[in-house]
Amino acid sequence: VLLGILNGGNIVMIAKEECKYDIRLGQHIGAIWPAYGSAMGLALLSELTDEEINGLYPEKLPIMTEHTIPTRRELKEKLLSVRLEGVSFESQGGWQGTEGIGAVIRNASGKPIAAISIGVPVYRMNQTKRDQCAAIIRMGASLISYRLGYQDSRGVQIRDLEEIRDYWRNRRG
């Protein structure tokens, strides 16, 4: 799990928790990469207006892998789906062989201040795991936001870590 903040058009990783598996996605605290190539970045970029996106990026985006979003127009289209789903999905756009799922963290006034993501090697991912990870990342972002004082106007908010644990136990049988 990664925690990052937006700095201009880049995401800066400020915290991480590594998995128990031998094969991990090796990111270090302080790492900086283009926001359009990461799940955390896409989550945070989805909170910006089209004009703000125009000010951050040229029409043709620098390519990091063969799956990187190539243009600002396509980035804006991707951000529309992130806004609708409340979670971002990024597959191999920043790092070959990895998939990320991210969500925004809000402060007490509702302002997006950070994002969290789960990074998974693509060979471990399928639609069932993608759906489970999306639910977990939404819940995690909701809990952190709640603890920062954010009150979701829809009344959908995770208030305790035990709610996430219960969800995970029930999903895994």
Image: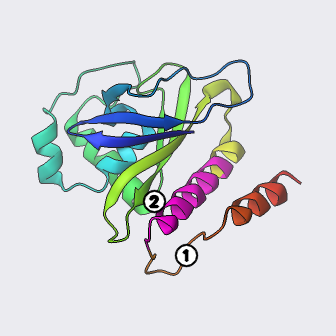
For the point 68% across and 61% down, the residue is: 161
In the orientation shown, which residue stands out farthest toward the right?
A: 173
Q: CA distance from mark 1 to mark 2?
A: 12 Å
Residue labelled with disc 1: 156
Q: Residue at x 67, y 25 (%)?
A: 123
The reply to whether residue 81 is visible in this rendering is: no
Instruction: Locate residue 160: give its quadrant.
Output: bottom right
Q: Residue at x 41, y 62 (%)?
A: 84
Q: Which residue is mark 2?
A: 86
| Dot in front, 1 or 2 | 1
Q: Residue at x 83, y 60 (%)?
A: 170
Give whichever of 138, 147 is nearer the camera.
147
Mark 1 lies on a secondary structure that is: loop
Residue 120 coordinates in the image, percent (x, y) = 61, 31
- 40 is within the stretch colored magenta: no
Horizontal arrangement in the rendering, residue 102 relative to residue 54 (left or right): right
Q: Position of residue 157 (x, y in %)?
A: 56, 72
Q: Main secondary structure of the magenta part?
A: helix
- Decide: marks 1, 2 in contact (CB < 8 A)? no
Residue 50 is situated, as x and y percent measured from the top left of the image, at 17, 53
Q: Which residues are magenta?
A: 132-150
Q: Which sits in the foreground, 71 or 149? A: 149
